[in-house]
Image (cartoon, rainbow, N blue to C red):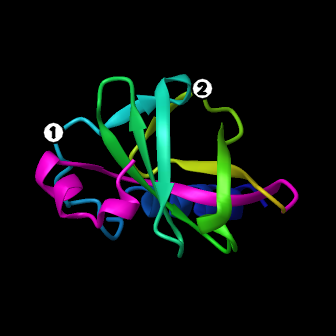
Amino acid sequence: MRPSFLFVASALALAACAPVDGADIPRSSEPRACFLVQQVTSFRSDGRQRVYVRTIGDEVFRLDAIACPGLETNFQIGLEPGLGSSSRLCQGDTVRLIARGYTSDVQSCPARVGPHLTEAEVAALPARDRP
């Protein structure tokens, strides 16, 4: 029985050295854009599944919500970082969007932190979508 155990252990060790898809893709040296939840000063929704938030530093980030109806009627939102996360949210992180409308109950839906928008990208948004 011992030789078969060694064979399995050797095969597992070799498999661990095998190339992985995407392993040779160079990682970006650019740091991910981040913001702190408590620094969000305003928000706007495009009425579909995107929410734009502005921070104290006048930075604008896009949040891509998933299955979150009625975003256009919300007057308050909250952001709850994913399990085990701090209040620092970075591009690509998941977050729970907690929204409250004038006549609707509090809703919660998952969202992903999208890119940090440049000044030109913010200016290109329709006025109703700019936070």
Name the residue tied to disc 2. Answer: 86
Amino acid type at mark 1? Ser
Amino acid type at mark 2? Ser
Report the residue at 84% width, 62% height from top: 104
Quadrant into which the N terminus falls = bottom right
Q: Residues within 10 Å of mark 2 (few under 14, many from 20)?
A: few
Q: Position of residue 119 (x, y in %)?
A: 15, 46
Q: Position of residue 68 (x, y in %)?
A: 68, 69
Report the residue at 32% width, 65% height from top: 19
Q: Nearer the viewer, residue 59 or 2?
A: 59
Name the residue tied to disc 1. Answer: 29
Q: Nearer the viewer, residue 16 or 121?
A: 121
Q: Earlier in the sequence, mark 2 or mark 1?
A: 1
Q: Nearer the viewer, residue 96 or 40?
A: 40
Residue 129 appears in which quarter of the rendering? bottom left
Q: Position of residue 39 (x, y in %)?
A: 48, 24
Against 124, residue 96 (above or below) is above
User: What is the C-alpha distance between the residues marked 2 and 1?
Assistant: 23 Å
Q: Which residues are magenta?
A: 104-131
Q: Is 17 inside the magenta-drawn segment?
A: no
